[in-house]
Image: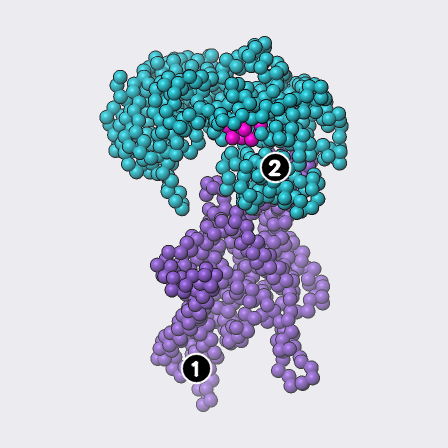
Amino acid sequence: MPFQPVILITDALFFLLTAVLVIFVLMIRTRPHLKRPWQKVIQRSTGAVSLCVLLTYYAVALLDSMHFHPRLDTQVAAEYQYANEIVSVLDVIMTPMRTQVEKTFSAPLSAYSFSKEMIQYDDGRVEHVYPRLKYGGAHLSDPGIEKLADLGQLLLRGIALGLFGWAVIMGTFILLSTASSGQALKHQLHTMIKDKSDYPIGAVSVTLGLIAVLIASSMVVGSQYHLFGTDKVGQDVFYQAIKSIRTGVLIGALTTLVMLPVAIILGSMAGFFRGWVDDVIQYIYTTLNSIPNVLLIAASVLLIQVYMNNNADSFDSLTERADMRLLFLCLILGITSWTGLCRLLRAETFKLREMEYIQAATAFGVSKYKILARHIMPNFMHIVLITVVIDFSGLVLAEAVLSYINIGVDPATNSWGNMINQARLEMAREPVVWWSLSAAFIFMFVLVLFANLFADVVRDALDPRVSGSD
Amino acid sequence: MNTLLHIDNLSTDIQLSDRIIPAVKRVSLQVHQGETVALVGESGSGKSITALSIARLLPDAGRVTSGQVLLHNENLLAKSERAMRSIRGNRIAMIFQEPMTSLNPVVKIGQQIIESILLHERLSKTQAKQRCLSLLDAVGLPEPARNMAEYPHQLSGGMRQRVMIAIALATNPELLIADEPTTALDVTIQAQVLALLKSLQEQRNMGMIFITHDLGVVQQIADRVIVMRHGEIVENALSADFFKAPQHAYSQQLLNALPSMEKRGLKLSDHTHSVDQQNSADFSQQAILKVDHLVVHFPIKAGVLKTTVGHVKAVNGVSFELNPGRTLALVGESGCGKTTVGKSILQLLSVTAGAIEFSGDNLLALKGEQLLNKRRDLQIIFQDPYSSLNPRMLIGDIIEEGMIALGADSLASERSAEIDELLHQVGLPEDARNRYPHEFSGGQRQRICIARALAVKPKVIICDEPTSALDVSVQAQVLNLLKDLQNKLGMSYLFITHDMAVVSYLADDVAVMNEGVIVEQGSVQEVLTQPKHAYTKRLLSAVPHVSTG
């Protein structure tokens, strides 16, 4: 085998989450009352566009979660040797950016280093100059003259490639939708171009086109230049920002996975059984709520750090160690963030348990747990979904804040919080090194913005008080 | 007589996200000074939208597409919003259905009335207060001076509706629009409010548009009747003529759909077929359900330790018997404890004292398995067809749930055949089982509830106001269905209701409840024609009767 797959714990959970999402989507397709609000979500152009952007982020995170040990190029035929290092599929795709490490800072798209160095020529002359970069723009003989033209050429090539990819995607989509709708291709094209469809096909195709062009051109340009420059140790900042997507999405998604069962089970039990059950659950969450979250998170992260230092042998690699810490961060964030949803669900269950269909079920002698599962839970699921989508962006931001004060993910893990934390000192330099911070900011901003837009649309579609239906 | 309001060719559309509903179609009508015009129709007939169009208070989705609304020859639809504000509440006043939500709960009654006076007239504070006192006196509040300083929650529903009327009359309006002002009130209070409205209207020579679905109320108050259906006026006649000889087929149908004593044994709204009166109730038979001195108290808890400081005595020693195949009506006004009786028979509430005997066993002593076995014999149909069906379940699953829980039929194929049969029995299409509750209308939902109750083949069904949320013609269908099913399957009904007309049509025996006790019981003929207890007499005299011919 050319590689040896590795499944980290967070990978496994992430795959599990993906499977759950896929099952959820398949389930919705068969139930009209669930399908209707989601159709409303993607019929609105904001919803469809943000879903495209979020799915792109998700796909990057998924690619970055497929880890393996690459094979070493040893010529012993009988037995393969695998490298100790763990890389992901995304790393392979971005190989030039991952491996092209410069000495230190360099500005975006520059061919020269950011700081002057003493260079000794062969003839013994010593000069204090900005040295050429080892990889960025290394193919140019005189960057001052050729760089712009070269960049333009690369950009055009990238755009062409992106448009080609877009055409392939749209072509497949049109063929698939024609096949499923059973209409003639000509007719289908007609509806699409005239924008007569129920779905915002125009907005979606423009978004997909933009995404395809952006990805293709940044890959093409990024293979020759450092798109967002390099950091202190010469690593490509664009590569780091892309790698951080997995951390951000994972924190948002896994924390939800931890928090949901607790919130749903405790919230519905408190509301349904009332009495002492309610009292106990209420005391738990009011107590938890009155401890400052950051304090709790800091204490837990420090604890886990001490544990990992004492048991350093039980981790095969640095990656695994960092992964463990990421998982614990998700757990702790989950433990501190279920209280809000729990409170909402308790109140909703209070209301639902007085509904007459619950009484009818009691009159039939249906057991209490069955009533909870069949009559109460499906009726507050819209609240759960709305909260999850709204909380997601908050969690992504929380990661950045926690890493900034050094109680977030492992320093070895790529994350926007870590990037911002490192950029703290760079901001104080003269001239200022702005690209690390900006790259982290841009990628995080786009994710959070579209997550929030999506949350708005989901809320409008699912919340009966807003939509006035259901 | 002077024409006060002239509506000419009014059309109003409601714009939904996916379609446009024409709510009012080319409606023309006139209201003269001192005249009461009743707008009658079932829900969705466009009567409220017509009223809202007059005052230009349509919801955002509503648009007047054509026509004129002339108040003394001024077109209200052409006025600016600013000019409209001084007309609303000043020359046109409105009263709404729900007195609980129409008043601001955190502002004192007096202040709310004074505010609306000062908004439209230049008066000093003391003058306004004086006016307020005389208004409260006019609408018959017992102690105007004290009531002024009270908050809305300190008043009963009827008193709150009187306050609403006082606010509406504060500025001597020329036109009063009353949108189902008595629907949320008990019959005795309704009678008082109607009499009050009538006398105030005559004193002040106001024009009044009275929107209602209750033909009994119409006959009491209206000079002219306008019947609306699907946004159109189908009949416009003087009240006396209308009740003597309704012209339009729909008006006749509405009148025929009213349940009453004379129509016992006949199908409502359809006099051709008579229901087989084989209610040969065998009096020698043992009572199937026997309630003996039932007491239900709800503890009032207060303080940190939640100690019980008192009890709400909802039911205070109620006894009655229900015979197989008979219908016992439990009648009373809201808050008298009739629903509590129904729920405690089903063990949905805990009983404080007394005994409930069902075919020889004391239900209160049963536990677990034994109770479950009895549950299949006792079922309930609720008042609100919208909250009694789980919106996330298919109709088939809803009906099947009870069968599974009580183990009625063990095989899935048997259950499936059973569901088809049940849907057929209650008159629903067969494909209904694969649809969701929201796809059905109120009457259809009530049929689903009946099918759900029937699924476990009960011997007694407790009907908790099953028709009070429905329109008259739909109510007639549901009552017909209940009667048919009883004749076919021989169940007993405990029929909880406040509607005397329904009682006289359907019930065999009546028990009248007031403040947690039964004040009078007996056969329906006895109680309704020769009431003995003062409360029963008061209740019966307050019911608005429709007399035709």
Identify the secondary structure beneath mark 2.
helix
Q: Which residues are magenta?
A: B475-483
Whole-percent x, y for residue A160 in the image: 39, 73
Element under label 1? loop
Which residue is farthest left?
A: B73
Chain B display color? cyan
Identity of the residue drawn at 37% across and 57% down: A195
Vertical relation: B388 (above or below) B360 = below
Q: Amino acid at mark 1?
A: His
- Left or right of B444 in this view: B23: left
For the C terminus of chain B, which image quadrant?
A: top left
Q: Is residue B209 magenta?
A: no
The residue under the point 62% across, 78% down is: A2
| Residue B476 falls within the magenta-colored stretch | yes
Q: Is residue A91 left or right of residue A112?
A: right
* Residue A455: % across, % down: 48, 51
Distance between the alpha carbons at the discs numbered 2 and 1: 79 Å
Q: Is residue B172 visible in this depiction of the protein?
A: no
The answer to which of B339 and A20 lies nearer the viewer is B339
- Indicate the chain coloured purple by its letter: A
Q: Amino acid at mark 2?
A: Arg
Q: Could you say which disc has been placed on residue B452 in the image?
A: 2
Residue on which disc 1 sits: A139
Disc 2 or disc 1, which is closer to the eye?
2
Q: Position of residue A155 (x, y in %)?
A: 39, 73
The residue drawn where x is 42% and y is 72% is A164
Tell me where residue B37 sits by quadrant: top left
